[in-house]
Every structure is written in C-alpha cells, then in structure tokens.
Image (spheres, rainbow, N blue to C red):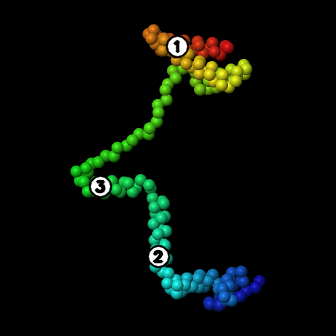
Amino acid sequence: MLTLNCSVCKKEGRRRNLRKVKNKLFCKSCYHKHLREHRKETIEVMGIKEELKDLKNKYAKELRLKHRNPNTRNYIRKSEKMQQNPSKAFYEPFIQSPKTKKKPKSNSFITLEERRVLLRIIMKNGACFEEARERVSEIVKEQARVREIMKEQGKSEEQIKVKQKEMLEELWKM
C-alpha cells in the first residue's frame, strides 16, 4: 500500500484517498477548502458576483412558480379584491358541477354480461359481428317497447318484469 502526505496539513493517507491538483496532493477536507477558495477568487477576479446573484434569484423564482399550486394566484387576487370591497366580506364562490351527460336508461331486463353472452351465441350461429350487434340492440329496443305498451295499459311493475323475463327465456331457447 502506497501512503503519501497531504501537502497542506501533512496528514498521511493512501494514494486513492488523496486528490492531485497542480502537482499537489490534498486530503478530502483540504481539497474542499481549496475548491471554496478558488471559487471565491474566480468570482472576484472576473467580477461576475452580481450576475450570479441575478441568476440565482431567477432560478429560485422559477422553482417556486413551478411547484406552486396553479389556483393559488387566483385565490390571492380574490382575497385582495375582498379587502378592497368590505361590502362583499361574506363572498361565497360559485362552485360549478362537472358537466356530464346523463345516460338514458334502457329499461331492458338484459344486463351487460347477458348482452355479451347473447352476442357470442348469435355469432356462433353464423352471423357476423355487426349483424349480431344489431340483433342484440333490436332485442333491447323490443323490450323497451313492450315495457312502454304495458305501462300504457296500466299494468304493474311486477307484471312488466314477469313479461320481460319470459321474453328473455324465449331468447335463450333460440
């Protein structure tokens, strides 16, 4: 093992723990001190201290803006307006609900899984996918039509459900 001495503090250490800068060997602590001193000298000699401060402030500002919640700026502005107009001190913001379309209810007795099973059965019988899909949609429309007719006749929900179950059983017997 090769042991050498630090050129500043004369501390003994192995070669791989010492760093070489301009034909001088530095231990870890002395090397960091040397780097700090060199950095200070470079900044003073080149006269770029003000430019570095500006860049540092600009970078810090960009980081703050990047990590800030996008709604906070608007919130601050609203609160400032509230302080300007004390008459609106008890301002409640209008909260909009998400704009979603309501799905029309099919009023059919067939669930999604049963539709898929029916689709497979019809396709096994020799129909292509489009024809099978049309047949299933016609079955659903037929059930909805029968339901409307029975409601017009004044029949109860239980009777309508029984009729739809019978229609479903006929479909499974196909």
User: Which residue is painted at 35% across and 57% down in the image?
Assistant: 76
| Local crowd size for mark 3, using a 10 Å CA cut-off: few (<14), some (14–19), many (≥20) | few
Query: Looking at the image, is mark 2 or mark 1 earlier in the sequence?
Result: 2
According to the picture, the residue beneath numbered tag 2 turns out to be 53
Secondary structure at numbered mark 2: helix
Image marks 2 and 3: residues in contact by CB distance under 8 Å: no
Question: How far across and down, in percent of the image, does residue 153 sit?
Answer: 45, 9
Give the CA distance from mark 2 to mark 3. 34 Å
- Tag 2: Cα neighbours inside 10 Å, few (<14), some, or many (≥20)? few
Q: Position of residue 14 (x, y in %)?
A: 71, 83
Q: Residue 114's spot in the image, x, y percent?
A: 62, 23
Could you give the CA–CA distance between mark 1 and mark 3, rounded to whole angstroms? 60 Å
Q: In the rendered image, which quarter contains the C terminus?
A: top right
- Quarter occupied by residue 167: top right
- Amino acid found under the numbered disc labelled 1: Val
Which quarter shows the N terminus? Answer: bottom right
Q: Residue at x 49, y 68 (%)?
A: 59
Q: Residues within 10 Å of mark 1 (few under 14, many from 20)?
A: some
Q: Residue at x 49, y 25 (%)?
A: 105
In the displayed structure, 77 sits above or below 141; it is below
Looking at the image, which residue sits at the far right?
1
Mark 2 touching mark 1, by CB under 8 A?
A: no
Q: Earlier in the sequence, mark 1 or mark 3?
A: 3
* Residue at the farthest top position: 153
Q: Is residue 81 above or below residue 96?
A: below
Q: Which residue is mark 1?
A: 146
Q: Which residue is mark 3?
A: 81
Question: Which amino acid lies under the numbered mark 3 shown in the image of this protein?
Answer: Lys
Q: Given the image, on which type of amino acid does mark 2 rest?
A: Lys
The quarter holding residue 68 reads: bottom left
Whole-angstrom CA distance, mark 2 to mark 1, is 79 Å
Q: In what element is the residue under mark 1?
A: helix
